[in-house]
């Protein structure tokens, strides 16, 4: 999980890029991209954000 968030922070919160690089599903890639985008918009948030699972 940390590697995907780091990738999203380095290359931008692009779910398509994350899905291609890590072989993630669509929903998972979007979750990681959203988490990275939140970190970009609020620098006080930790990079190791816990992303809740959707059921």
Image (cartoon, rainbow, N blue to C red):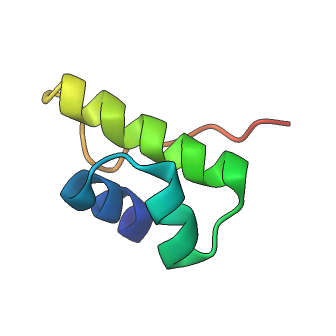
Q: In the rendered view, tell whether residue 3 sits above or below residue 54.
A: below
Q: In the rendered view, tell whether residue 31 sits above or below residue 26.
A: above
Q: Position of residue 36 (x, y in %)?
A: 34, 42
**Residue most toward the left?**
43
Q: Is residue 1 visible?
A: no
Q: Is residue 41 left or right of residue 50?
A: left
Q: What residue is at 21 percent from the left and 34 percent from the top?
A: 40
Q: Nearer the viewer, residue 53 or 18?
A: 18
Q: Position of residue 2 (x, y in %)?
A: 39, 64
Q: Is residue 22 visible?
A: yes
Q: In the rendered view, tell whether residue 54 sits above or below residue 11.
A: above
Q: Nearer the viewer, residue 41 or 14?
A: 14
Q: Quadrant of residue 53?
A: top right
Q: Quadrant of residue 52?
A: top right
Q: What residue is at 42 percent from the left and 64 percent from the top?
A: 4
Q: Is residue 26 left or right of residue 32?
A: right
Quarter placement of the C terminus:
top right
């Amino acid at each position: 999980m940390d590697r995907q968030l780091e990738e999203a922070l380095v290359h931008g919160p692009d779910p398509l890029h994350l899905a291609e690089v890590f072989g993630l599903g669509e929903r998972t890639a979007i979750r990681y991209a959203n988490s990275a985008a939140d970190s970009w918009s609020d620098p006080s948030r930790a990079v190791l954000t816990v992303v809740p699972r959707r059921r």
